[in-house]
Image (tube, rainbow, N blue to C red):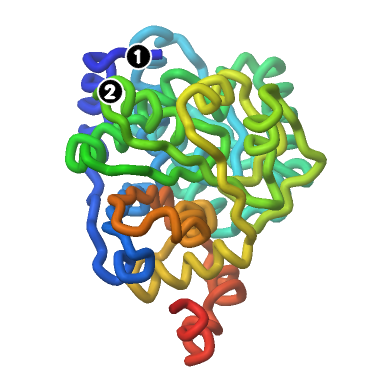
Amino acid sequence: MFDLKELERAHEVVGRAVLPTPAHAWPLLAQRLGATVVVKHENHTPTGAFKVRGGLVYVERMKRERPGTVGVISATTGNHGQSLAFAASRYRVPVTIYVPHGNSVEKNRAMRAFGANLVEHGEDFQVAREEAGRRARQDGLEFVPAFHPDLVKGVATYALELLRKAPDLDVIYVPIGQGTGISGCILVRDLLGLRTEIVGVQSTLAPSYALSFAAGTVVTTETSNTQADGMATRSPDSDALEIIRKGASRIVQVSDDEIAAAMRAYWTDTHNLAEGAGAAALAAALQEKKKLQGKRVGLILSGGNIDFDLFRRWVGPEVASPAGERALA
């Protein structure tokens, strides 16, 4: 999909707007897992999530190679849309973003603040995406899919930062939404000639990639009702699935309750706010804790964009209670 020179150029493009994010080894997480734990903090980007990197690389290339583009359009549950809105505003390109009804209020506000024309349509991401595609054809806009080589190359820059800083990681856990993040980690691992194991993470309520990984072909699901909206995918991308099947060792499924516990652990152990998808890697590592004793573990905290009301309902009361704290131990 790209070579190391192309990836380094993408890192330069990203670096004009996004500083390298921290990769911290947290001692309390190490105690919790019985392993050295390095967290890649993609919640510390200007949009609060890793996808900003992909948007910057995509729009920069589009502006160079297709300067006559009248505007871009896409669908999202939040972080992809914020990425495109952020990048499009920097390159002065009009952007329209479709979201499903009931989407995160705070993510919607952020996309509008970054300059997006926001349209609510349909009951879930899949329906919103289909309508955005129809609108693109109608209005002559460039439709930006959730998975594209330029998006992968952009988000892969976080894996480049992490694996150059910590090339001795035994395993990295990566949440899967549309597959750009885990694909980037796999491709960078291979470009650097490392042997780090890559493990994908999905919700038990949105397991399309896990089912597809096991079946060896694309498997869609009827629903994706997880509260971890960054992983709420019903239809896997076939190109992403091919990369994942070749380069990931397995996909772990985690429940919303396990994700909530991991969100609490991040809050108590690191004082970082993780959205559902952002906490999923830690949830999977906690599920596989016995396998990880004494190892060096990388966790991708992919984003921190969770509505306050959802955080309060989902995990807040247990953070405040002694019983909740005991449950985390």
Residue 88 visible to the viewer:
yes
- The numbered mark at residue 277 is none
**In this rendering, which labeled residue sits more in front, label 1 or label 2?**
1
Q: Nearer the viewer, residue 246 or 294?
A: 294
Q: Nearer the viewer, residue 278 or 13?
A: 278
The residue under the point 69% across, 15% down is 137
How far across and how far down the image is residue 161, in percent? 23, 37
SS under mark 1:
loop
* Residue 1 against residue 71 in the figure, above or below: above
Image quadrant where residue 157 sits: top left
Please give the residue where the numbered disc 1 appears in the rendered image.
2
How far across and how far down the image is residue 129, in percent? 68, 31
The residue under the point 55% across, 84% down is 317
Please give the residue where the numbered disc 2 appears in the rendered image.
10
Give the Cα distance between marks 1 and 2: 10 Å
Q: Are marks 1 and 2 in contact (CB under 8 Å)?
A: yes
SS under mark 2:
helix
